[in-house]
Amino acid sequence: MANRLPLLITLAGVAVLFLSIVFVFALVLGAMFFDGIEFTGGHTDAMTSGIAWGLVA
């Protein structure tokens, strides 16, 4: 079993790398088909309301 340990560690590393690439690919496809991904927490939507413009002015 000890001689298989490096192989198992390598396979686990490859699996993590592959899954992370698939995750980023899914994020890109999601951004393309579902109006992007908003990382601002909705602040841009809040700034378009009339109350926010009254507070800014």
Image (tube, rainbow, N blue to C red):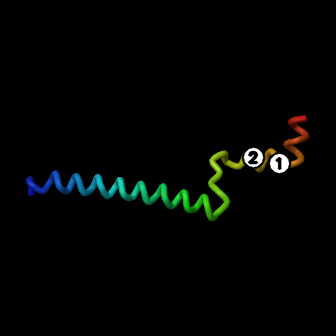
Packing grade of label 1 (10 A; few <14, some 14-19, many >=20) is few
The image quarter in which residue 55 lies = top right
Residues at marks 2 and 1 touching, judged by CB atoms closer than 8 Å: yes
Give me the disc on residue 48.
1
Left or right: 44 as drawn, with respect to 16:
right
Q: How many marks?
A: 2
The three-letter code of the residue at mark 2 reads Thr
Q: Position of residue 24 (x, y in %)?
A: 48, 55
Q: In which quarter of the image is the C terminus?
A: top right
Q: In this view, does 39 lie to the left or right of 54?
A: left
- For label 2, the SS is helix
Image quarter (top left, top right, bottom left or bottom right) of the N terminus: bottom left
In the picture as drawn, the residue positioned furthest to the top comes out as: 57
Q: What residue type is labelled 1?
A: Thr
Q: Which mark is residue 28?
A: none
Task: Name the residue located 15 percent from the left edge and 53 percent from the top edge.
Answer: 5
Q: Is residue 4 left or right of residue 34?
A: left
Question: x and y percent of residue 23 in the render?
Answer: 46, 58
Who's the residue at 85% across and 49% down the image?
Answer: 49
Q: How far apart are marks 2 and 1 (CA)?
A: 7 Å
Identify the element where label 1 is drawn.
Answer: loop
Graded by Cα atoms within 10 Å as few (under 14), some (14 to 19) or many (20 or more), the crowding at tag 2 reads few
Image quadrant of residue 11?
bottom left
- Kindly identify which residue carries mark 2: 44
Residue 53: give x, y in percent of width and height: 88, 41
Q: Position of residue 10 (x, y in %)?
A: 23, 53
